[in-house]
Image (tube, grey):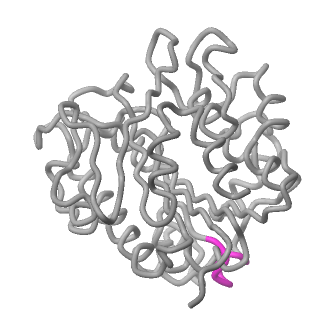
Amino acid sequence: MSVGWPRVLMLFLDGVGIGPADPRRNPFFAAECPILNGLLGGRMPHLSRRRATTSHAVLVPLNATLGVPGLPQSGTGQIALFTGLNAPRLVGKHFGPYPYSSLRSVVAEQNIFRKLDEMKRRCQYANAYPQRYLDHLATHPTRTTATVLAWLSAGMTLNSTSELLNGTALAADVTSERWVRLGYGNVPIQTPREAGGRLVSLLENNEFVLYEYFFTDHAGHSQSMQQATEILSVLDGLLGGIVDAMDHRWMTLLLVSDHGNFEDLSTKTHTRNPVPLFVVGANKEHFASRCKNLTHVTPAILDALI
C-alpha cells in the first residue's frame, strides 16, 4: 500500500486518568492488557512515571484541571478537548455532564468537525445510536454530550441502526451486545478486534474519525473492579484490531480522555489526575511535543491534517 494522505482515528474514553500503581485501586494494574502493555514496552504509566516512549507508541500526560479549582467534569472537559478553548475558565468552573448553557454556542461555532469541514477534510463520528436515544434527543435537545452537540452543530446527522448494519458505524459498547439486549436482534455481535478493524476502515473515506466510549466513566463511578477489568479487556481487543489494521506510516491513533475517574476506584468522584494522550502510528512526536493539556489536542489534529 502506498503512503496516503494523513488520517487520524481518535478514541475518546470518558473518565480515564493516570493513577496510582496499585492493583487494588487502579484497573490498569489489575487487568491483563497484552496489547496495551506490549505497545508501552510493559511499563504501564502511573503517577510516579507519567510518560512512556517506545518504538510503537508515545504516552504523555495532559492537564485536565486547566487552572480552574475543583474537580474536572465531562461537559467543560470535552468542550476543551473538541474546541481547543479553555471552557472551565470561560465560565469560571468545571461543569458537567452536559455543556454549560452559555458554552453551547461556543461548541457550535468552534468544534473540530466544523473546522475540518472548513478545511475540506472529511470526518466521521463513528458511534451509532438506537432509536430511543434519537427520540429522546428530539424532545430534550439540551441534554446532549459535547460530542453529539459538536457533530450536530456541524450540520451532520447521527448514525442509527442502518449504519450499524452496513458497517459504517460502531455501537457504544464496541461489540453491539447491548443493542441485541435492547431488541435489535438483526444487529450482529462482533469481537472487539473486528470492531477495531471496522474503525480503521472508516479512514478510507475520512481524514478524521472519532469514536466515543463512556463505559469507563460508568465503571469508575460504580467502583467495580470486576466491571473495570472487563471493560479493559474489551478496549484492549479493540486496540489490537486497530493496530493490526492501520497503516502506521500515515495513520495516527489517538487515545485520550477528559478527566480522571476510572484510574482510582477508591473514590466515587472524578479526580484531578492528568489524563493520558496515547499515540500510535504516524506523527507521534508531533502530538507528544504539542500537547500539554486538553486544549492542545484539537489544534494539533488540525495541524496534522493540513
* Residue shown at the point (57%, 72%) measured from the top left: 183
Q: Residue furthest bottom?
A: 1
Q: Nearer the viewer, residue 45 or 71?
A: 45
* Residue shown at the point (45%, 73%) measured from the top left: 242
- In magenta, the rendered stretch is 162-169
Vertical arrangement, residue 184 with respect to residue 218, above or below: below
- Which quarter of the rendered picture does the N terminus lie within? bottom right
- Which quarter of the rendered picture does the C terminus lie within? bottom right
Judged left or right of residue 229, residue 190 is: right
Q: Dividing the picture into quarters, in which one does residue 220 lie?
A: top left
Q: Nearer the viewer, residue 250 or 29?
A: 250
Vertical arrangement, residue 279 with respect to residue 252, above or below: above
Judged left or right of residue 232, residue 161 is: right
Q: Magenta region, mostly helix, strand or loop?
A: helix
Judged left or right of residue 264, residue 271 is: right
Q: Position of residue 302 (x, y in %)?
A: 69, 49
Q: Dividing the picture into quarters, in which one does residue 108 lie?
A: top right
* Residue shown at the point (45%, 56%) measured from the top left: 284
Q: Nearer the viewer, residue 184 or 220?
A: 220
Q: Position of residue 141 (x, y in %)?
A: 80, 39
Q: Dividing the picture into quarters, in which one does residue 49 lie?
A: top left
Vertical arrangement, residue 184 with respect to residue 223, above or below: below
Judged left or right of residue 43, residue 116 is: right
Q: Position of residue 189 (x, y in %)?
A: 47, 81
